[in-house]
Amino acid sequence: METAIIKIGNSKGLRLSKTILEKYNIKDKVEMILEKGQIILKPIDKPRKNWESAFREMNANDDDNLLLDDVFDDENFEEWN
């Protein structure tokens, strides 16, 4: 399918038909993947879908530890006063 790039203010954009939006269940956002000379658009229904269950599983597996300390050894709290 060929479609035109349109001017939107100082930018340019791509117009998707209502039929395509409905067929692929595209609401407000899409994930844009740049890969091997292609641009792939994937619908996003809920950006953080299933995060809650993933976090619970991480906690149950004791896999939710900080990767970095929240306070560094050389941190000087006096400079913030």
Image (cartoon, grey):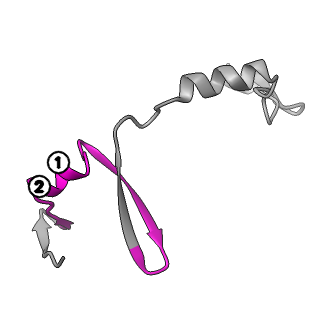
Q: Which residues are magenta?
A: 11-38
Tag 1 and tag 2, C-beta contact below 8 Å: yes
Quarter where residue 80 is shown: top right
Location of residue 56 in the rendering, given as x and y in whole percent from the top left corner: 66, 19
Above-or-below relation of 3 to 41: below
Magenta-colored stretch includes residue 28: yes
Residue at 11%, 69% in the rendered image:
7
Q: Classify mark 1: residues with Cα within 10 Å, few (<14), some (14-19) or many (20+).
A: few
**In this rendering, would 40 be left or right of 12?**
right
Q: Residue extending furthest right?
A: 73
The circle drawn on residue 19 is 2
The circle drawn on residue 59 is none
Q: Which residue is mark 1?
A: 22
Q: Secondary structure at mark 2?
A: helix
Q: CA distance from mark 1 to mark 2?
A: 5 Å
Front in this rendered view, residue 12 or 21: 21
